[in-house]
Amino acid sequence: MSDRPRLLPLLGATRHGSRDAMTCLYRCGNACDHPVPNTSDNPYLGDIVDAEVSRRGVVRAGAVGALVLGFGGATAGALAGAGAASAAPADPVVPEAAGFGRPAGGVGSGALTFRPIPPNKLDTLVVPNGYDHSVVIRWGDPVVPGAPEFDVHAQTAAKQAKQFGYNNDFVGVLPLDKRGRRALLVVNHEYTNEDLMFPGFTSLDALTVEQVKVAMAAHGMSVVELERVDGTGQWRPVESGRRPYNRRVTALATKFELTGPAAGSAWLRTAADPKGRTVVGTLNNCAGGVTPWGTVLSGEENFNQYFVGGDAAPEELKPKLARYGINTTERYPSGNRKWDRADERFDLAKNPYEAHRFGWVVEIDPFDPESRPRKHTALGRFKHEGANVIVARSGHVVAYMGDDERFDYLYKFVSDKKFMAGDSWVARKHNLTLLESGTLYVAQLEGNSAAEIDGSGKLPADGAFNGRGRWIKLVSGNRSYVDGMTAADVLTFTRLAGDKVGATKMDRPEDVEPSLLTGKVYVALTNNTDRGKAGKAPADEANPRNLNKHGQILELVEDGNNNAAETFAWSLPIVCGDPTDPSTHFAGYDKAKVSPISCPDNVAFDATGNLWISTDGNALGSNDGLFATAVEGPERGHLKQFLTVPLGAETCGPFITGDNRSVFVAVQHPGEITGATVENPASTWPDGDYAKPGVVVTWRLDGGPIGS
């Protein structure tokens, strides 16, 4: 990349909704400047010809509901006996979750009692009256015991590999004791912004190789031991003692094991790894999830921007690379990091299959710091926002996933094996294999009122955007269900398989999370300003607005309340935007009483079943934030804004502890505004000097449950 003119902070260009040009460059490599990768002619939604949709009457699943007793979804039994996957540890770790159960009152009415905060453009984190917050950990803070003190003027890759990484996204908090005093924080580090990391920055080309390696070390994941502060909802890192769990996973050096049917296939073999079984590093880790057996899943998303040399890749490979957003006409496309200067495996001219080794769901065991993280090929390869797991009535594990791209697809995976309950080592060793083999599906949706959808967002005559859907089987174990593609083909080039079977094009499906209380599934569809443009898919009932700036929330109800079912009902309880805009919808709730919301990104549940929604790229002009609403009962659709993040930042996470006393969010890319630098920051959060991404915890001053 050539040198760019330096602009004053706050005067930079805003592009693609409200996202700043700097964010577009670093987060996704200017993806919106490149052609939409999905050029298939898959049909949009048609009218339903069979069953009428019912949006009510869902029976709670007993096995599913039980899981909420754990700290964020992990049961005491499932977490106990943690250790390496190969053999029982000599000194087993026994984390407990029983102390992190529901509030004493059980499942609540869903009413949220906090007073919503107003939209704002303040360079601080704002929470409701009666609440407080603190920074848990920030970029550069020590993770590994003995990590050097952070010095932005003297950073090295070796230092960064022991310190908290950059641009935290997913947040998971897993309990370590019965009394609720200790826990493990697990965080993704999605991407770096070299403008805001290196004093004196002029261009990516001008970075030294060591600085490139610093950026590589700042990617990945962190595991940090926490302690509760004085019995409140506040948490802080443990700063003394052994801290045996603390760990950094980086794009620079950490080795990952490939599992599942595509592992070892020709598509995943390279000169450095001729067996196709071991990958160095993980890239652009976005959202994730906590499994019922106490591990964390992490989704590799915009990995395409890290590779160069696509123009010199084999001709027969170029269409496959292009479907994943990799430029095949230029050596150095717009937005590229040029990591090939530090590691030639990022040069596709020399290593054309290296890109196939990214775009997977990663599983890490935070309770076994010596274990090797795994990339699960059975869950398919695409731009994973994340993955969230629920145990179906049958006992099979179901993982829901979104492909975060304009006009891409919604997926789910159903394991071959069944979840094994209990606190034995045998049970946990078994459960650690559940994501290695199963059936992968892609979603196809149909609408009730297709003829009435005109792209304006106007509700159909039946008063709802709703319909039916089915899960199309792509692959099961080593058997492909897609003509002309082997199982390894389907799993390595899952987008192409979805194209072939006619999956429904969605408006950037990001986080997908099942409610552990009801089994219903909620999808954040962030936005799609290309919807309805010439040559692009028009609005349909699940994506009802052309030039969609604000996004929507999709609700799926699997038939028979069985998460392993192959058919479902769907609806849009929330169509985002300014409540005064007639194209918005809040489950029929009085729109005069709801908060404006734009660009939903991540979703989570509290212990009483309320849905929490974080935003990314608020196109209404105010800072991004965190919102909450009931999804059952008379308060369904009563959306309230709970917090806002500082200027230029995105709200990531969120994570509400199982005792409902703490809500964690990741404040990602504060001050990421064109023209900002370390020396001339657009945000000084959190320390008053220059911007640093960090994780925040919020709690009620009176010690009561969050929200209600």
Image (cartoon, rainbow, N blue to C red):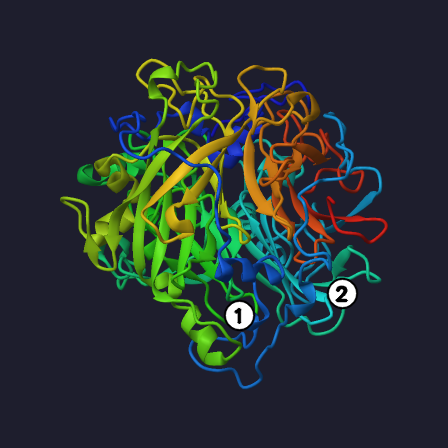
Kind of residue at badge 1 = Ala
Label 2: few (<14), some (14–19) or many (≥20) C-alpha neighbours in 10 Å = few
Label 2 near label 1: C-beta < 8 Å?
A: no
For disc 1, the marked residue is: 78
Kind of residue at badge 2 = Glu
Residue 474 left/right relative to 4: left
For disc 2, the marked residue is: 239
**In the rendered image, the vertical position of residue 645 relative to residue 66, given as above or below:** above
What's the CA distance linking mark 1 and mark 2? 28 Å
**In the rendered image, the vertical position of residue 169 relative to residue 71, given as above or below:** above
**In the rendered image, the vertical position of residue 532 relative to residue 613, given as above or below:** above
The percent coordinates of residue 608 (x first, y second) are 64, 50
Q: Is residue 405 visible?
A: yes
The percent coordinates of residue 496 (x first, y second) are 25, 39
Q: Quadrant location of the C terminus?
A: top right
Q: Residue at x 25, y 47 (%)?
A: 474
- Would you identify the image quadrant in which residue 149 lies? bottom right
- Would you identify the image quadrant in which residue 53 lies? top left
Label 1: few (<14), some (14–19) or many (≥20) C-alpha neighbours in 10 Å = many
Along the line of sight, the residue nearer the viewer: 653 or 503: 503
Along the line of sight, the residue nearer the viewer: 703 or 187: 703
Q: Is residue 204 visible?
A: no
Could you tell me which secondary element the residue under label 2 belongs to?
Answer: loop
**In front of the other: label 1 or label 2?**
1
